[in-house]
Amino acid sequence: MSPEQGKIFLNFFVGSIEQESQTTRKVIAAVPDDKKGYRPSEKSMTAHELAWHIPESEIWFLKSVADGAFAMPDGEAPKPATMGDILNWYEKNLKEQMARVKALPAESLVKTVPFFGMEQPAVMYLTFLTHHSVHHRGQLSAYLRPMGAKVPSIYGGSADFPFQAPA
């Protein structure tokens, strides 16, 4: 991959991450704090764990791309206490790490970086970030109605927030 192609991919992936992060915020915000312990099965993460995993992993992916290496964190970071705290953390850290990724020189974007047996240009891990988040956001959105919360519109309307055609 050429450095110019790396910049093209970066611009595309950054737009996707920015758009998807808006939906992620809506889903996390829909989790009531008094129901954050909900899990559909003993094998499932709680809503709180899942709501934290999504932004925490996104920031880890962005930081890793910006650093040019994937380093596993030492231990587990403490989960913020409320959905509002998670969203505040996400907002702050997403802005910081997105700025770092956007500022990367083209040569850093196309540098081959190993990740759990894969080796690909650093910029390509941004699509993995998006797919990982969409996967877990889908899980979290499926928790909402059974826990008594409203399901936000995600890629279209929901029973709680029907699609409204523009006037």
Image (spheres, rainbow, N blue to C red):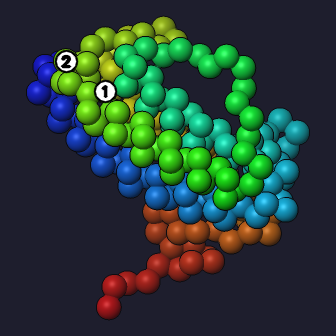
Q: Residue at x 73, y 40 (%)?
A: 79
Q: Residue at x 74, y 69 (%)?
A: 149
Q: Secondary structure at mark 1?
A: helix
Q: What x and y, as percent, mark residue 69? A: 43, 14
* Residue 161 occupies quadrant: bottom right
* Residue 146 occupies quadrant: bottom right
Residue 159 appears in the picture as rendered: yes
Q: Is residue 161 left or right of residue 95?
A: right
Kindly identify the amino acid type of the residue bearing the numbered disc 2.
Answer: Glu
Give the mark nearest the N terminus, 2 or 1.
2
Q: Is residue 51 left or right of residue 34?
A: left
Instruction: Report which residue position mark 1 lands on.
Output: 123
**Which residue is nearer to you in this view: 67 or 115?**
67
**Which residue is nearer to you in this view: 103 or 48?**
103
Q: What x and y, as percent, mark residue 90? A: 55, 47
Q: Residues within 10 Å of mark 1 (few under 14, many from 20)?
A: many
Q: Is residue 57 left or right of residue 122?
A: right
| The residue positioned farthest toward the bottom in the image shown | 167
Instruction: Report which residue position mark 2 lands on.
Output: 107
User: Taking 50 as reference, is 128 above or below it?
Assistant: above
Q: Residue at x 88, y 39 (%)?
A: 42
